[in-house]
Amino acid sequence: MLYLAQVHKNEFLDQYQLRLLARQEAENLWAIIPEEAFILLGKGNTMSEKLLVLVELSPTGDIEKIEDASNWVLHLVQTYLSVGMTPELLQEEAERAEQWRQSLTLQNQDLARRSLELEARREQIQALEESLKRERNGHHKDETTDA
């Protein structure tokens, strides 16, 4: 699993560790890790203090890959922040999309109701046509009652 982490020096153990800050939940969805979670890098592994890194952890919590997060952060800035995409704007867009969804659902329900009404009317018309045909056929057979 992919994490955003920051390098810290553990003075007590005299080695560097990663403080996990966020975890990737899906391609464009991350969750902040509220509690302090650290992974020791082991003796001899030195990295710049406070450096932000992307770290890939195995299911057992072993470090599979570490890379500087600078390019990733720059990509986020270019993709989302250079066009002024604020959390408020995203929330407004999500609300607008939900309103459209609800409106379309209501329209679909209305169309389905109208379709059922039209089908019922069509059946009534067919029944009336059948009734008229029977009446006409009855009149043609018994022309003495026709005056």
Image (cartoon, helix red, strand yellow):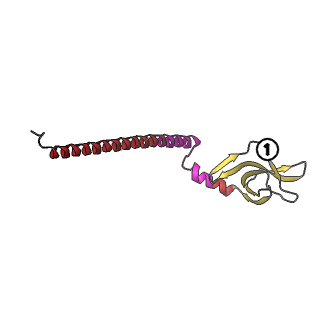
Q: Is residue 31 left or right of residue 79?
A: right
Task: Give the quadrant of the C terminus.
Answer: top left
Which residue is tagged 1? 36
Label 1 Cα neighbours within 10 Å, binned few <14 / some 14-19 / many ≥20: few
Pick the residue in front: 14 or 125.
125
Residue 125 to residue 40: above or below = above
Residue 87 included in the magenta stretch of the image: yes
- Which quadrant: the N terminus? bottom right
> Quick check: 127 left or right of 13?
left
**Residue 7, percent from left and from top:** 79, 52
Is 105 part of what is drawn in magenta?
no
- Dominant secondary-structure state across the stretch colored magenta: helix
Direction from residue 62 to residue 81 in the image, left or right: left
Specify the segment rendered in magenta. 75-100
Residue 68 image point, x, y percent: 72, 57
Give x and y (percent) for residue 128: 26, 42
Please name the residue shown 31% across and 44% down the image: 122
As rendered, which of 119 and 61 lies closer to the eye? 119
